[in-house]
Image: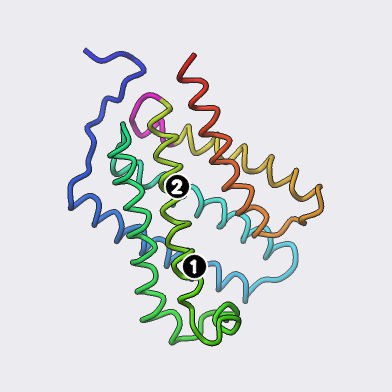
Amino acid sequence: MTSAVEPTSEVKADLRTVLGGGAKLGLITSLGVVVFALVSSGLSGTAQTLVQLVLILVGGIVFSYAPAFWVRPREVDSIAWASLVGLLGALAFTVVDTAILRPVDLYHWTWDEIGGGSGFWYIPVWWMGSATLAWLGSWIYSESGRAGDVLIANVAVITSAIAIVGYGVLGIAGLGFGPAVLALGFSLALVVHLIVAMVSRRR
């Protein structure tokens, strides 16, 4: 018999789950990037900013918690497997981006120009960042003490609320209210949420 605070779902760290999750995450990321690019070119002003903010928030939630949803991590090893799903998702997106999105000139790659025409000075940073989001999300999931679909929704809502508050604080502090600031706020929210989850579990 399991207690109310113990995971009730089995860890799914098999090859099919990890590779399949990475592929799905890469496709979801590609779709999000396409929508973001189309919104950025088709809208302007406040409407553009609001839609971009929603896409950033949803994208952060998906990349942070989808790997946990698929793997159901309980301990260090399964958290690492979920983090690998995040890394594979970024790699899958890189393939789609290189093979399809760049050739059709969907968006302008300013970072390539900064790097002298090469993207490989910042693309690995994207990979590491993606793995870190999945790692933090999975760690929060594990520290929250139980598994299940409702838990994913709960932790995502809590992280989002912290991110929105952090976004407001950063904006008032002078960083502005653009999408990049929300992305920073969401990343910091994951760290704050993890600390809260760890403290709460140990009480």
Residue sitting at x 36%, y 34%: 149
Q: Label 2's element?
A: helix
Find residue 24 and report its image quarter: bottom left
The answer to the question of whether label 2 and label 1 lie on touching residues, with beta carbons closer than 8 A, is no
Q: Does the magenta stretch include residue 123?
A: no
- Report the disc number at residue 33: 1
Inspect the image, locate mark 1, and give the three-letter code of the amino acid beneath it.
Val
Q: What element carries label 1?
A: helix
The residue under label 2 is which amino acid type? Ser
- Residue at 56% across, 57% down: 55
Q: What's the mark number on residue 64?
A: 2
| Apparent side of residue 139 relative to residue 181 in the rendered image (left or right) | left
The location of residue 103, given as percent across then percent down, is 43, 87
Report x, y in % for residue 38.
56, 73
Q: Residue 74 carries which label?
A: none
> Which span of residues is magenta-colored?
145-152
Picture quarter with the N terminus:
top left
Q: Residues within 10 Å of mark 2 (few under 14, many from 20)?
A: many
Compared with 177, 144 (above or below) is above
Residue 165, above or below 197? below
Q: How crowded is mark 1: few (under 14 residues within 10 Å), some or many (20 or more)?
A: many
